[in-house]
Image (cartoon, rainbow, N blue to C red):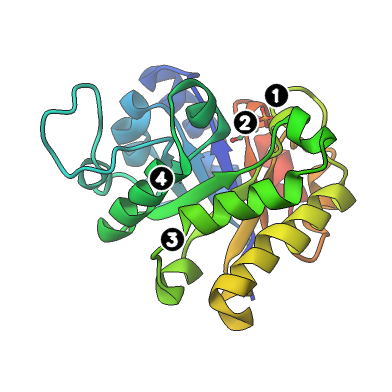
Amino acid sequence: MRTPFIAGNWKMNKTADEAVAFVNQVKDALNAIEGVDIAFCPPFMAIPAMAAALKGTKVGVGAQNMYFEASGAYTGEVAANMLTPFCKYVIIGHSERRQYFGETDETVNKKINAALASGLIPIVCCGESLQQNQAGVTHDFVSGQIRNGFAGISAEEAAGIVVAYEPIWAIGTGLTATAEQAQAIIGGTVRATLTELYGDETAQQIRIQYGGSVKPSNVAEIMAQPDIDGALVGGASLKPDFVELVKNSV
Ligand code: 13P
């Protein structure tokens, strides 16, 4: 069975000091919740201090991005092996990275390979815009993101990757896809595409999160869907009632 996985994507919020103060406030309560994997993905500057604060707890740390080259003249970038001492996870291809920082399916593919080579678990994001949703091209677009992102990735590697389906129109807008809408794409497009690529046995092992305005009040309904294994949570992971959200997910 796939262990549920709730991850907080803090985006560009909280200094290192604020991050440590926050996790010190919630870590014991989160550590006591069984049957779910939990992680926070803070800005780079907070990662080492957070990893130290969360040591010995079940709460993991992830990065929000990384570069695919191992080292070199890439001003401003961070390599996978710089994250490995502190992080278990790395978010790859978030829609905000694609929208504002020029990420493509090709860079996503390179980053997945680099993350795996350094022993990080990629959380690979996909999802359509409002315009694409309204034009009825969601299935083809999201399926294409998965196919291109996973190009050349073996079944064995794919089994350990986490996919996050985040419809762009539901991110930070308060608009949530209904649990049924999320299930329809996560089951009928994301897992279906992974089944075409890798077969049923592998596709059934891959954890798929939903992201987009997940809150303590709607997480249970989302998690009740058969193909939804977790959530990638933005705004609601910055507040202490994230503990309630995680409790309500199991
Ligand atoms: P919100 O939960 O704030 O809508 O953000 C979702 C998201 O983008 C997580 O990666």
Q: Report which residue position mark 4 lands on.
A: 106
Ligand 1 is found in the corner quadrant, namely top right
Q: Nearer the viewer, mark 4 or mark 2?
A: 4
Q: Report which residue position mark 1 lands on.
A: 172
Ligand 1 is within 8 Å of the C-beta of the residue at disc 2: yes
Secondary structure at badge 1 equals loop
Q: Amino acid at mark 4?
A: Glu
The Cα atoms of the two marked residues, 2 and 1, are separated by 7 Å
Identified at 32% across, 24% down, the residue is 45
Chain-order first, disc 2 or disc 1: 1
The Cα atoms of the two marked residues, 3 and 1, are separated by 30 Å
The Cα atoms of the two marked residues, 2 and 3, are separated by 28 Å
Chain-order first, disc 2 or disc 3: 3
How packed is label 2: few (under 14 Cα within 10 Å), some, or many (20 or more)? many
Q: Residue furthest left?
A: 72
Q: Nearer the viewer, mark 2 or mark 1?
A: 1
The Cα atoms of the two marked residues, 3 and 4, are separated by 9 Å
The Cα atoms of the two marked residues, 4 and 2, are separated by 25 Å
Residue 151: mark:
3
Q: Amino acid at mark 2?
A: Gly
Q: Report which residue position mark 2 lands on.
A: 234
Chain-order first, disc 4 or disc 2: 4
Ligand 1 is within 8 Å of the C-beta of the residue at disc 1: yes
Q: Nearer the viewer, mark 3 or mark 1?
A: 3
